[in-house]
Image: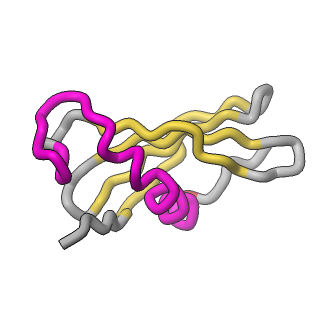
């Protein structure tokens, strides 16, 4: 069965209006916590740039308990769900 991440909670944790960068911490249904970093241009378009798994639980894909890049494959899926829950920061 393929991994299908489901975001159950997402919060904006930092926002820098000068350069348009902001971070969202998203909690997934399988207790994995990820930090997503976004870039916002002057037109208001939001682009996910990075995703990091916070080391609270082992990776649900490879089961490693240390840094891995497995969540990068699901960056677009997780980021769209997190933006739906948390929204974008207001300037």
Where does the image place residue 18, in percent across and percent down from the top left? Answer: 79, 27
Query: Is 81 located above or below residue 58 in the figure?
Result: below
Where does the image place residue 88, in percent across and percent down from the top left? Answer: 66, 53
Residue drawn where x is 37% and y is 63% of the image: 7
Left or right relative to 39: residue 6 = left
Point out the residue furthest to the right here: 43
Residue drawn where x is 69% and y is 30% of the image: 16
Residue 83: image quadrant is bottom right
Where does the image place residue 72, in percent across and percent down from the top left? Answer: 41, 44
Left or right relative to 21: residue 84 = left
Residue drawn where x is 61% and y is 41% of the image: 38
Question: Which color mode does the image show?
Answer: secondary structure
Q: Nearer the viewer, residue 66 or 20?
A: 66
Left or right relative to 28: residue 87 = right
Point out the residue furthest to the bottom here: 1
Q: Which residues are magenta?
A: 59-85
Q: Quadrant of the N terminus?
A: bottom left
- Magenta highlight on residue 83: yes
Q: Quadrant of the C terminus?
A: top right
Q: How many marks?
A: 0
- Magenta highlight on residue 74: yes
Q: Nearer the viewer, residue 68 or 35?
A: 68
Where does the image place residue 79, in percent across and percent down from the top left? Answer: 51, 55
Residue drawn where x is 50% and y is 45% of the image: 24
């Amino acid at each position: 069965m393929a991994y299908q991440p489901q975001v159950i909670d997402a919060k904006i944790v930092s926002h820098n209006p000068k350069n348009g960068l902001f971070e969202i911490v998203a909690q997934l249904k399988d207790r994995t916590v990820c930090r997503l970093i976004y870039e916002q241009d002057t037109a208001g378009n939001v682009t996910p740039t990075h995703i990091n798994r916070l080391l609270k639980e082992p990776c649900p894909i490879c089961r490693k308990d240390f840094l891995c890049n497995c969540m990068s494959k699901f960056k677009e899926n997780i980021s769209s769900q997190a933006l739906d829950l948390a929204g974008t920061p207001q300037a």
